[in-house]
Image (cartoon, rainbow, N blue to C red):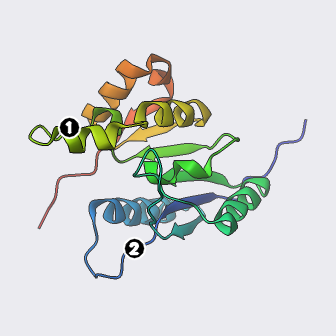
Amino acid sequence: MSERHVSGILYVCFLSESSGIEDGGEIYDRKTVTALRRDGTNVDVLSIRRSKKIGVPTWASRIPTAKIRRIAAAKENGQKIILSHEGLFGINQEDSVDLIIVHNYFPAFLFASRPFVTAYYRLGAKSFFSKHFERANGIVFLSHRDMAAARLDFPQIEMKSVSLPPPPFES
């Protein structure tokens, strides 16, 4: 049996906004890619512009067809695929993906003083995450709380999930 050569990682994340101020997700992605490269891993970054779509869940982004083709070609060429943000999990429609990074586990999202906002973010979220957890070979959560909530909802993910929160903010 011949083993297929793996040519590194395709790290799929949201395009950094041009405001000049990075959000937490952008900082996490930048530091993760830097660390992987520093350790000698070949990492290609595919940035996708954040776009809203009409539908449920509301926070899931519409993914351009050309980007979906690029990911399929990378997978065909032996690259491991990492999707960094639940808004990008829609790329993974039918096939498995190597790793998904959950920035926010929306079925557990809570705005205590704004129940309408809580309902808005949770609408369709459990079904969405269920489908993508099943298709992922590995799951990284950026908070222990989100991982605990997801494992309560989906006990079968315990052996393929881990919590790796970002280090504390340092000025």
Nearer to me, 118 or 169: 118
- Secondary structure beneath dot 2 equals loop
Q: Residue at x 35, y 65 (%)?
A: 26
Q: Residue at x 55, y 62 (%)?
A: 40
- Secondary structure beneath dot 1 equals loop
Of all residues, the one furthest to the right in this rendering is 1
Q: Residue at x 8, y 41 (%)?
A: 113
Occupied quadrant, residue 152: top left
Whole-percent x, y for residue 47 in the image: 52, 69
Compared with 77, 19 (above or below) is below
- Going by the image, does 171 lie left or right of 78? left
Give neighbour class at mark 2: few <14, some 14-19, many 20+ (Cα, 10 Å).
some
- Going by the image, does 123 lie left or right of 53? left
- What residue does disc 2 label? 16
Q: Of the residues shown, which amino acid type is indicated by label 2?
A: Ser
Q: Of the residues shown, which amino acid type is indicated by label 1?
A: Leu
Q: Does the residue at mark 1 contact the one at mark 2 (Cβ under 8 Å)?
A: no
- What residue does disc 1 label? 110
